[in-house]
Image (cartoon, rainbow, N blue to C red):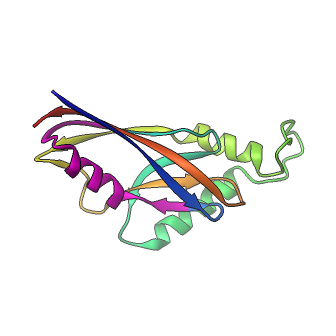
Amino acid sequence: MLQALDTLTLSTSGAALYEFTRDVRRFVEASGVATGLLTVYCRHTSCSLLIQENADDDVKTDLDGFFRRLVPQGMAWIVHTTEGADDMPAHIKAALTQTSIAIPIAQGRPVFGTWQGIYLFEHRTRPHRREVVLHIIGDA
């Protein structure tokens, strides 16, 4: 049984989806695991992870627009505003998505669909440095 662990640091420039599929593929290939399971874990509460289409950038635009409409800034009932108007909406968006994703590994590669990519979904409006932990376990 093989295991490997790494942390990616992803820089964001504001609310948007940031693809890091290539980084995940490189990590899996370097691990030596042929068959197993990859866990991708986001160490933050105001961004999240998504597996989504990566062939058309309009998908990212539409997803971001949907979540902005679903959870807009400036909702009068929000109490937690210590870090700004975008903070609690970012926490709500993260709660509606996920901070951890499991991806099967087969033949030494993540089993993504043809048009799938993995994204960090930044929910804050200002730039951040985000950490995503990759853990793989399996057989050579």
Query: Residue 25 appears at what percent x and percent y?
Result: 27, 55
Q: In this image, 34 relative to 84: left or right? A: left
Q: In this image, 60 relative to 27: left or right? A: right
Determine if the magenta segment contains residue 72.
Answer: no
Q: In this image, 113 relative to 108: left or right? A: right
Q: Is residue 68 above or below residue 40?
A: below
Which residue is located at x 10 percent, y 47 percent? 107
Q: Nearer the viewer, residue 88 or 140?
A: 140
Query: Residue 30 appears at what percent x and percent y?
Result: 22, 50
Which residue is located at x 50 percent, y 52 percent? 9
Q: Nearer the viewer, residue 11 or 111?
A: 11
Which residue is located at x 62 percent, y 63 percent? 65
Quadrant, the C terminus: top left
- Quadrant for residue 80, please give it: top right
Looking at the rendered structure, the number of numbered marks drawn on it comes to 0
Give the magenta part as a residue range. 17-39
Query: Residue 131 appears at what percent x and percent y?
Result: 52, 46
Determine if the magenta segment contains residue 23.
Answer: yes
Residue at the top extreme of this rendering: 1
Quadrant, the N terminus: top left
Q: Is residue 85 above or below residue 6?
A: below
Query: Residue 81 appears at what percent x and percent y?
Result: 85, 42
Which residue is located at x 60 percent, y 37 percent? 95
Residue at the right extreme of this rendering: 76
